[in-house]
Amino acid sequence: MDYLLIYAHPNPKSFNHAILETLTSRFDKEKRPFQVRDLYKLNFKPSLSSEDFISFSSNTAAADIKQEQNLIEQGKTLIFIYPIWWFGMPAILKGYIDRVLSRNFAYGVNEKGPYGLLSNKKVVIINTTGGPKEHYEEGGLKDILKTTIDVGVFGFCGIKITLHKYFYAVPYIGNESRQNMLKELKAIQID
Amino acid sequence: MDYLLIYAHPNPKSFNHAILETLTSRFDKEKRPFQVRDLYKLNFKPSLSSEDFISFSSNTAAADIKQEQNLIEQGKTLIFIYPIWWFGMPAILKGYIDRVLSRNFAYGVNEKGPYGLLSNKKVVIINTTGGPKEHYEEGGLKDILKTTIDVGVFGFCGIKITLHKYFYAVPYIGNESRQNMLKELKAIQID
């Protein structure tokens, strides 16, 4: 599988969904095998439980976690599509990270400290925001979206981000600008 | 109500729970009225739904959101207790932020942009981490925990953080150090 798309937005009429459709149409045309994980449609359980913790140490993850881990193993490039809410991921996607990127799957720990286990993966991130670019760079926030996710999450798993694309102020820029964003995605270099 | 404690850890034997117990015992002794919201025990729903979005614009939030908003209105100081997972909040708490700190409750938007609506609140944050302090300050991560949460979430609502306390490397420092951390909490200035 060339692409595993992990998608997190509750509204099927959202611009995030248009991004998803644009990419899947492109991959269809390019005959690149892909699969979509629509976390809301899957009703993915976000809250890491005590049982999850215990199963991590015994290497026996819950069935829904195991399934996502198998898909990650199959996908060459993981593409995350989600809106920025409160300078982070929607809770349902944060829960996917908390539960699926578990110790001994996504990272290990030895006497020198933690090390990534997914360095053979590529990751692409496509974000929308409500606010303009400046809003995310004021008050010490510069590069914060890049740092928390690219370094704090995927860097920890040994993954270098291939592309992290932001579409800013999506609700306010008008339809023509949004259409241009989608046009850009049809040709953008992904891997 | 002097303190509303919002607590997010799945394990009642965790150090996070010991922090919660330490603070509630202290408030009992000091005869300060408080209430605890144990998000796991409440089985709080983390995923912001399309219905939530719609209800925000019509100012008719879901019952579980309304209940949390009422409690926030009553509490003078909000105390958040949670572990740092992947440089952020556990998904269940991220979902509390996504859903409860809604537009027109936590912030408004006018022609000049967004403005906070909760500037009469104090917020205290107590975090545990798995890694040592250095781990959270490498590779451009310096101040990242402070910035994402203090500025990106609570600053946006007009709240200045009264205290943001980190207890680092909690699983690795031994029991005596952990007991000293709890001792510190018994006397620490909160508001």
Image: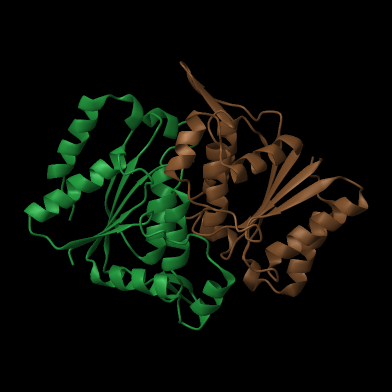
Chain colours: A brown, B green
* Quadrant in which the C terminus of chain A is drawn: top right
The residue positioned 78% from the left and 44% from the top of the image is A3
* Quadrant in which the N terminus of chain A is drawn: top right
Q: Nearer the viewer, residue A61 or B141?
A: A61
One can see residue B169 in this view: no
The residue positioned 43% from the left and 76% from the top of the image is B104
The residue positioned 19% from the left and 32% from the top of the image is B179
One can see residue A166 in this view: yes
Q: How many marks?
A: 0
Q: Residue A6 at x, y = what percent? A: 68, 50
Instruction: Say whether residue B27 is left or right of residue A87.
Output: left
Q: Residue A176 at x, y = what percent? A: 77, 72
The residue positioned 29% from the left and 69% from the top of the image is B71
Q: Residue B69 at x, y = what percent? A: 35, 71
Q: Nearer the viewer, residue A169 or B80?
A: B80
Q: Residue B120 at x, y = what percent? A: 26, 69
| Quarter where residue A119 is shown | top right
Compared with B30, B51 (above or below) is: below
Q: Nearer the viewer, residue B36 or B157?
A: B36
Instruction: Say whether residue B114 is left or right of residue A67.
Output: left
